[in-house]
Amino acid sequence: MKGLVYHGPGQKSWDDVPDPTIEAPTDIVVHIDSSTICGTDLHILKGDVPACLPGTILGHEATATVVEKGSAVTTLEVGDRVLVSCITSCGRCRFCKERRYGMCTGGGGWIFGHLINGLQAEYARVPFADTSVYKIPAELDDEEVLFLADILPTAYEVGVLNGRVEPGDTVAVVGAGPIGLAAIMTAGLYTPAHIVAIDIDDSRLARAREFGADVTINNASGAAAAVSEVMKLTGGLGADVAIEAVGVPETFELCTELVRPGGRVANVGVHGHSATLHLETLWIRDLTITMGLVDAYSTPRLLELIGQGKLNALPFATHHFRLDEMMSAYDTFGDAAKTQALKVVLAAEPLSDKPRAAHKESLVGVA
Ligand SMILES: [Zn+2]
Ligand SMILES: [Zn+2]
């Protein structure tokens, strides 16, 4: 089969690789129906994630069809369509029992395209299948649910829920990339008074309005303008919740300046450098600061909201490719400033149209 292989910093290619097989009785093997690329994949390609070894197939977001199941898998059948999430859960460790699946110590957590081969490929092995994948309702298309594999639960759990957004709140979202837009969209579920989007790019701010922001602030000239506009909007108090969705020191520090006393700062951004926590001014302001990796415990609920038409993830899909156009999809996604890409959708040929004899043969004799 083909897969997008990481060959060390700055190097990747769409290679012929061995077909995945069942390695543990709790595994399934899936045919990837649709996949996408994440900012985290670009971090790996920069060399920022040393745990991801050269030779690993990248990707941690997909919809797929089960083609083979291990002997211990009881809730899935060959032919089931499933969402394969960025987070895998062993279901047994202490953290999984506390629904903190992202911290799984039993072999799960964020493993796809990181510690094991990922989902930017024609097929993939999925460990702990019973406790890790989500069946896709027949009436929903792949593209409608694909972004539940990462950005929607990440923005919702780590941003909106950790930030404890409540009806009537003023929510400031710093950064209007895919994660910031997903935070804006899911914050809207709570009928806040205002959703303020802050970014340095006017076209992203225009998009933030489409996703539900009612106030937009361009902070290209520095933090002061953003702080004073938020203060004006909130009678001098500050936002109830500030969601950091960029991952650089300046935007984190801006969030701590934007919130009111007693407010919440929810960090979602992936940081590569240390930020300064100004305790000399913050100690008296009763702030709550949260951070975290997604656990994906909210995925079933978000899936229901999509099924009910109360959440629409389709606007994230700005560019479409065939799965074998992976390299061009990376070019488009990697140059988002120019291409205006939010998320790219890579769609495989439907399973039924594919010659699968070779794949079946490779599975003979496996558990
Ligand atoms: Zn991701
Ligand atoms: Zn676990």
Image (spheres, rainbow, N blue to C red):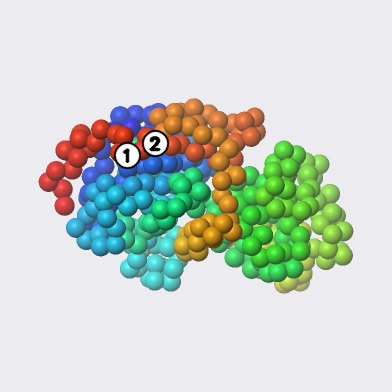
Q: Residue 333, relative to residue 74: is it above or below?
A: above
Q: Which amino acid, mark 1? A: Leu
Mark 1: few, some, or many residues within 10 Å (few <14, many ≥20)? some
Q: Which amino acid, mark 2? A: Ala
Q: Which quadrant of the structure image shows residue 193?
A: bottom right
- Seen at 29% across and 58% down, the residue is 76
Between 366 and 50, the residue placed more toward the observer is 366
Q: Which quadrant of the structure image shows residue 238?
A: bottom right
Q: Residue 142, relative to residue 77: is it above or below?
A: above
- Seen at 39% across and 71% down, the residue is 97
- Seen at 41% across and 47% down, the residue is 63
- Assign a secondary structure to mark 2: loop
Q: In the rendered view, does 101 fall on the left or right side of 366? A: right
Question: Residue 263: image x %, image y %?
Answer: 72, 68
Residue 102 is labelled as none
Question: Residue 199: image x %, image y %?
Answer: 72, 45
Residue 116 seen by the camera:
no
Q: In the rendered view, does 162 fall on the left or right side of 61? A: right
- Seen at 59% across and 40% down, the residue is 342
In the picture of the structure, the residue carrying the numbered disc 1 is: 351
In the picture of the structure, the residue carrying the numbered disc 2 is: 348
Between the C-alphas of marks 1 and 2, the distance is: 8 Å
Q: Are marks 1 and 2 in contact (CB under 8 Å)?
A: yes
Front disc: 1 or 2: 1
Under 8 Å from ligand 1: the CB of mark 1?
A: no
Mark 2: few, some, or many residues within 10 Å (few <14, many ≥20)? many
- Outermost residue toward the left? 365
